[in-house]
Image (cartoon, rainbow, N blue to C red):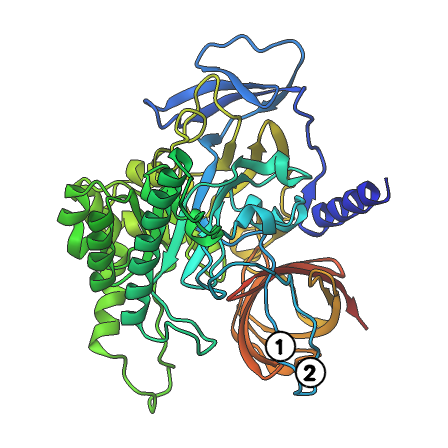
């Protein structure tokens, strides 16, 4: 009972902090969105139709439906209903796992510590599962839901083997309630181990990957032989890391290669062919260069919308950007259109972007660089569901499917759009109208403020799992630019790349923690004197909240 009360209190606070009304339905209630434009994705858009939701499922959709008498009605005049948006690769809900080294005068508390009896070092343990580290509760997903997302593939970003991903809905008070597919795919990254253990080079990484697959093949053969006739044969050793690779070898589970460059993608395709693996590319910045090979091998792409940004400062003394970087920034928004033209299936993912608001902004950039808007919507909905093998329950607005819906006032790619409602598993989250202020330019008419008012000093609590820690934020606002500092047990660090939007703020910072340099991406909102948001590290995301100080 105490835990239930605590979760309820956190949920109440988050809804208030983010400006959403608490009108969440139970799954037994019925909802009808009427008079709305409905983008079904599975067929032509319905210009004026109704969607009926009952018991967490879409009961009916059409132009001339009779609204059930027990339904709560939402007048959708001027609104467009889309299938719930899907982020095809993120680490949402996974706690950070930073372990400061001992003996340097810093705290030694581990954040979400993990233990394993694997025969392989951390980073080479494919048996680790994101679903087992997932932090349940709706409050942590509020910012992402407010951007229109209902579903996500979550996976750790740590190690060479990132472990097994999970596909979840972004609502629910328990992990079991959120899970759609607890174990979807094994994930692999072309990187090295930071501990000084083998492999320490990319060539070593390729060798380690191949050797582990060969060892897993050998283990499977030994197991089959032993099970058939164990007499006179030494029993095969148990090895859960190799056992976790057996579904991959048997094509019962896909393997996702995190690969961005042309050579990484080619190596991933070659490895998949060598071992007859069901492969998916994640990232895919240069996937357009090998689109023919991806198409020929039926390998889809989870395409990152975290487009490369200008790194050189505006100072006349700053070094000019390299030609390679200039080309990459120019070509990356064209990748989606080129993959579509080549017939390669792809879905959009956030790719660790600092602000989830960039997702739709960069999807729109893709439509300005050769991708049709219909294809862009599909890449955020049905294509992701197809790649996940979940198109029989997600990705379109059809009777019988899970009731995941995103409702927008204005075209979803428009800068002036507003996400008004999100429905997840039949549960309604309704966004309150933002306050409007009169402006002389419109003759006294009202319009939305261009930026939020976030300046001031804030005392915050960072909800590190198992050890909440206090910190302070000094936010200095100048138009849309945000500067200041973040201070805590890690010392004081200046804010970098600070930006203020109508929704809130985001910035980055680099801190020293236990002798390690850690890059932080921070996003949040201010409502009255309350502040809340998320701190994203290379190892995971951590929520924070607090209040303004005098």
- Say which residue appears at 44% left-offset and 62% top-offset: 124
Residues tagged 1 and 2 counted as in contact (Cβ below 8 A): yes
- Say which residue appears at 21% left-offset and 52% top-offset: 269
Indicate which disc residue 106 carries. Answer: 2
- Say which residue appears at 41% left-offset and 31% top-offset: 390
Vertical placement of 307 versus 430: above or below? below
Horizontal arrangement in the rendering, residue 146 relative to residue 294 (left or right): right
User: Furthest-bottom residue in view?
Assistant: 317
- Characterize the local packing of mark 2: few (<14), some (14-19) or many (20 or more) Cα atoms within 10 angstroms: some
Q: Which residue is mark 1?
A: 100
Q: Looking at the rendering, in which quadrant would you find the C terminus?
A: bottom right
Picture mark count: 2
Spatial separation of the CA atoms under disc 1 and disc 2: 7 Å
- Which of 490/220 is in front? 220
- Residue 419 shows up from this direction: yes
Numbered disc 1: secondary structure: loop
**Residue 370's x, y, as percent?**
21, 48
**Residue 454's x, y, as percent?**
65, 65
**Residue 99's x, y, as percent?**
61, 72
Vertical placement of 443 versus 529: above or below? above
- Which of 191/6 is in front? 191
- Say which residue appears at 24% left-offset and 48% top-offset: 275
- Residue 253 shows up from this direction: no
- Which of 107/72 is in front? 107
Vertical placement of 538 versus 164: above or below? below
Earlier-in-chain disc, 1 versus 2: 1
């Amino acid at each position: 009972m105490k835990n239930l009360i605590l979760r309820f209190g956190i949920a109440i606070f988050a809804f208030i902090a983010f400006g959403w009304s608490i009108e969440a339905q139970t799954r037994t209630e019925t909802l009808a969105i009427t008079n709305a434009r409905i983008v079904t994705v599975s067929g032509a858009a319905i210009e004026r139709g109704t969607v009926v939701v009952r018991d967490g499922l879409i009961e009916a959709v059409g132009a001339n439906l009779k609204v059930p008498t027990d339904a709560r009605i939402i007048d959708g005049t001027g609104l467009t209903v889309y299938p719930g948006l899907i982020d095809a690769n993120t680490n949402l809900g996974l706690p950070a796992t930073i372990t400061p080294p001992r003996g340097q005068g810093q705290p030694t508390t581990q954040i979400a510590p993990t233990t394993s009896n694997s025969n392989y070092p951390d980073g080479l343990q494919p048996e680790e599962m994101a679903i087992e580290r997932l932090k349940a509760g709706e409050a942590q997903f509020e910012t992402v839901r407010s951007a229109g997302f209902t579903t996500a593939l979550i996976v750790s970003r740590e190690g060479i083997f990132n472990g097994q991903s999970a596909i979840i809905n972004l609502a629910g008070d328990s992990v079991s309630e959120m899970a759609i597919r607890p174990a979807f795919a094994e994930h692999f990254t072309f990187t090295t181990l930071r501990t000084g253990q083998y492999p320490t080079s990319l060539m070593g990484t390729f060798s380690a990957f191949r050797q582990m697959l060969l060892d897993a093949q050998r283990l499977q053969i030994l197991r089959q032989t032993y099970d058939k006739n164990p007499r006179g044969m030494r029993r095969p050793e148990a090895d859960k890391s190799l056992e976790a690779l057996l579904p991959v070898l048997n094509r019962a589970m896909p393997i996702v290669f995190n690969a961005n460059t042309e050579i990484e993608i080619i190596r991933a395709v070659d490895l998949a062919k060598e071992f007859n693996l069901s492969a998916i590319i994640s990232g895919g910045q240069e996937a357009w260069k090998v689109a023919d090979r991806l198409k020929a091998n039926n390998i889809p792409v989870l395409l990152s919308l975290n487009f490369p940004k200008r790194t050189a400062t505006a100072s006349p003394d700053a070094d000019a950007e390299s030609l390679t970087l200039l080309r990459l920034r120019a070509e990356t928004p064209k990748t989606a259109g080129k993959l579509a033209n080549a017939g390669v299936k792809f879905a959009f993912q956030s790719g660790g972007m600092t602000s989830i608001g960039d997702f739709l902004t960069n999807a729109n950039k893709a439509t300005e660089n050769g991708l049709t808007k219909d294809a862009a919507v599909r890449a955020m909905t049905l294509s992701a569901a197809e790649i996940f093998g979940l198109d029989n329950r997600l990705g379109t607005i059809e009777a019988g499917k899970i009731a995941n819906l995103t409702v927008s006032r204005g075209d979803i790619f428009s800068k002036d759009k507003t996400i008004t409602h999100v429905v997840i598993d039949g549960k309604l989250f309704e966004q309150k109208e933002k306050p409007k202020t009169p402006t002389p330019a419109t003759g006294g008419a009202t319009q939305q403020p261009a930026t939020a008012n976030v300046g001031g000093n804030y005392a915050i609590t960072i909800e590190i799992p198992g050890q909440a820690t206090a910190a302070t934020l000094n936010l200095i606002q100048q138009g849309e630019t945000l500067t200041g500092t973040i201070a805590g047990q890690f010392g004081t660090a200046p804010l970098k790349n600070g930006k203020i939007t109508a929704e809130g703020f985001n910035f980055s910072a680099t801190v020293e923690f236990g002798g390690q340099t850690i890059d932080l991406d921070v996003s949040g909102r201010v409502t009255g004197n309350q502040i809340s948001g998320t701190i994203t590290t290379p190892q995971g995301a951590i929520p924070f909240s607090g209040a303004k100080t005098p």
